[in-house]
Amino acid sequence: MAITSIDIDPDGLKQAKELTGAKSNREAVDLALRTLIAVRRQPAAVERIIGRRFAPEQIDAPTVAPETQAPAARPDGR
C-alpha cells in the first residue's frame, strides 16, 4: 500500500468519521474512496443488468420457496 501525504479539511474529516463511525482518519478516507468508486461504477453495472439477455431455460427456471432454501454462505466464511 502506498503512503501518501495529503492535506484534508479537518472539519470534513471529523464529520466523515462521525457519520461513518470510522475510528481513524485512515479508515474514514479508505471508506470515502471505496464509496466514491462504488457510486461511480453503479450506473455502468445497472446498464449491464438492464442489457442482459436470458435464454428461455433461464427464464423458465424453477423457483425454490424461501423457507426451503439453505442460508447462503457469506464471503467472510460466517
Image (cartoon, rainbow, N blue to C red):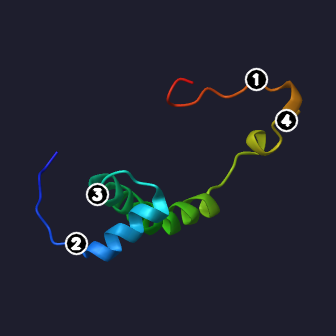
In whole angstroms, how far apart are the C-alphas of marks 1 and 3? 40 Å
Q: Nearer the viewer, mark 1 or mark 3?
A: 3
Image quarter of residue 46: bottom right
The residue at 58%/30% (across/down) is 74
Q: Earlier in the sequence, mark 2 or mark 3?
A: 2
Location of residue 47 in the rendering, given as x and y in whole percent from the top left corner: 56, 66
Q: Which residue is mark 4?
A: 63
Q: Earlier in the sequence, mark 2 or mark 4?
A: 2
Q: Which mark is residue 25?
A: 3
- Which amino acid is tagged 1? Ala
Depth check, front residue: 71 or 17:
17
Q: Earlier in the sequence, mark 2 or mark 1?
A: 2
Q: Secondary structure at mark 3?
A: helix
Q: Which residue is mark 2?
A: 8
Whether the residues at callouts 2 and 3 have beta carbons within 8 Å, the answer is yes
Location of residue 44 in the rendering, given as x and y in whole percent from the top left corner: 49, 65
